[in-house]
Image (cartoon, grey):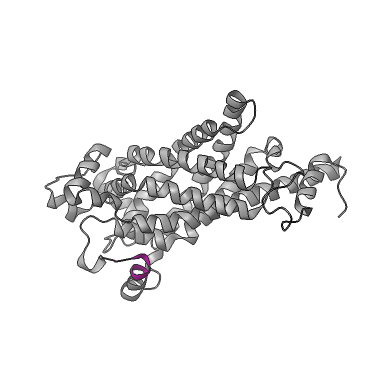
Amino acid sequence: MELSSDPAVATLEMSQSKSKDDEPFGSDGGDYESLPPHVSVTTHMTAGAVAGILEHTVMYPVDSVKTRMQSLQPDPNAQYKGVYQALKRIMQTEGLLRPLRGLNITMMGAGPAHALYFACYERVKRSLGDVMHSGGNSNLANGLAGSVATVLHDAVMNPAEVVKQRMQMYNSPYRGLWDCLKTVTRTEGIGAFYRSYSTQLTMNIPFQAVHFITYELMQEQLNPHRHYYPGSHIVSGAAAGAISAAITTPLDVCKTLLNTQENVALNSVNVSGHLSGMANAFRTVYRLGGLPAFFRGAQARVIYQMPSTAIAWSVYEFFKYFLTKQRLEQEARRA
């Protein structure tokens, strides 16, 4: 392979030419992670948006099942023993496309939310790493960067989550996306779209902190030289998603209750009006099902998060690599 005279492009091409059979997750060539200083915010945002849309789209039917399995007082026709059985019954009784209901609003929210999420994470991680670890990798910096990125991500994504989960529920009264938006706004006010925001942050900040720390720790072991190797990103992403999802399932159950405002469940414990606040959600979940209620849908949540997170990281790292390489090559040709 002919190497470019531009050092950065040469580094990328040398990294590509290494044999994965000899060194599956790393080599002594160019440092892939040394490239982000040359990467624009636009590159991170583009890569993040594509990764976010694919992450939510590919596994969306499982997410629909998870929402239903977290129902605290499900309809007898919506009680499921497992993910596969649930998907099969939903498609048989409600139509083949029923598990995809709410996907449109999810894609509309996931693009901008993940664009902000990854761009913020990369910038904050690098800034904190320079302060805490003299430019090196810092687990604390990774966790803090993930937490800061989550605040921006959830501010964009929370309204989409509310609409999505209401449309996913069994016997959802809404005809479609716009009907749901108009009905919720008219009957509950704009605040309904952020009723679960504090709970979402309480769940997602530890989720993302564990997620990013696990991912970076796995990368240190599997890909210590930080080259672009898809296998390491997939394995690290899947492990990070599974661990984070399992740990934060109780908070996800509370978030689902706040988003869906299950009338049957709330009426059974004499909750009038609309349930709000994380503390109230915790008390209501416990009254309805005790400690086991906090882990409803845990299996579906882990099954959803493992491939979703693996997809997000592998797609993000690929686009970050591809867009960086493309831009540096264009700069080399102009030089």
Apparent side of residue 38 relative to residue 128 in the rendered image (left or right) = right
Apparent side of residue 30 relative to residue 299 in the rendered image (left or right) = right
At which x and y percent is residue 314? 59, 53
Which residue sits at x=48%, y=59%?
57
At which x and y percent is residue 276? 24, 40
Give whichever of 323, 135 is nearer the camera: 135
Apparent side of residue 292 relative to residue 243 in the rendered image (left or right) = left
The question of residue 271 being in magenta is answered with no
Apparent side of residue 31 relative to residue 85 in the rendered image (left or right) = right
Q: Identify whether 205 is placed above or below 315.
A: above
The residue segment tinted magenta is: 81-87
Q: Identify whether 319 is placed above or below 174.
A: above
At which x and y percent is residue 95? 36, 73
Give whichever of 69, 192 is nearer the camera: 69
At which x and y percent is residue 292? 24, 52
Which residue sits at x=37%, y=59%?
300
Q: Which residue lies furthest to the bottom in this view?
A: 92
